[in-house]
Image (cartoon, rainbow, N blue to C red):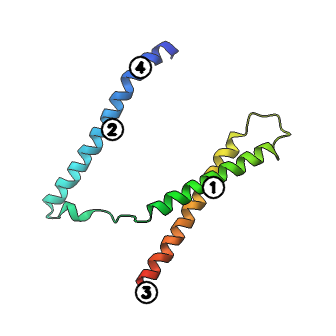
Amino acid sequence: MDAGTLGVLVPILVPIAMFAMIFGIIYLSNRERMAMIERGMDPRSSKKPINRNYVLTWGLLLIGAGLGLFIAYMLDHTAFATMNNDGNPAVYFALIAVFGGTGLFVSYLIEKKEAKKLEE
């Protein structure tokens, strides 16, 4: 597919795909509510519990991702500086994912400890 054809198809297909996605989400949500009403359940009472620690979760995720990016940058400019390459993008992605996941895990442990403290 050449660039001209792709340039014509993208402005047409992207809005159609976005509309289909939004319509599908609303349609499925409505069907779920209707099925709950048919079974005699209250659709308002089935909400998932709200995570009150979302600030902690997002904060530790972003701190972990930033730390991973910083360490990847330091490794790229020190340990991998002798290699003739163009930035080692795999190192950046890997360390951002590892440290971001570590931040999420630490957030989980903190929330678990707080929940256990509240139970006692």
The residue identified by callout 3 is: 120
Quick one: label 1, few (<14), some, or many (20+) residues within 10 Å? some
Task: Report how far apart the C-alphas of labels 3 and 2 lie in the structure.
Answer: 45 Å
Task: Report how far apart the C-alphas of labels 4 and 2 lie in the structure.
Answer: 18 Å
At a point 46% along the width and 82% down the height, the residue shown is 117
Foreground mark, 4 or 1? Answer: 1
In this view of the protein, can residue 95 be seen by the observer?
Answer: no
Amino acid type indicated by mark 4: Leu
- Which quarter of the figure has residue 67? bottom right
At a point 86% along the width and 39% down the height, the residue shown is 82
Q: Residue furthest right?
A: 82
Amino acid type indicated by mark 2: Met
User: Dot 3: what SS?
Assistant: loop
The residue identified by callout 4 is: 9
At a point 47% along the width and 18% down the height, the residue shown is 6
Who comes first in sequence, dot 3 or dot 4? 4
Labels 4 and 2 touching (C-beta < 8 A)? no
Amino acid type indicated by mark 1: Val
Task: Report how far apart the C-alphas of labels 3 and 4 lie in the structure.
Answer: 60 Å
Task: Report how far apart the C-alphas of labels 1 and 3 lie in the structure.
Answer: 33 Å
Amino acid type indicated by mark 3: Glu
Q: Nearer the viewer, residue 5 or 103?
A: 103
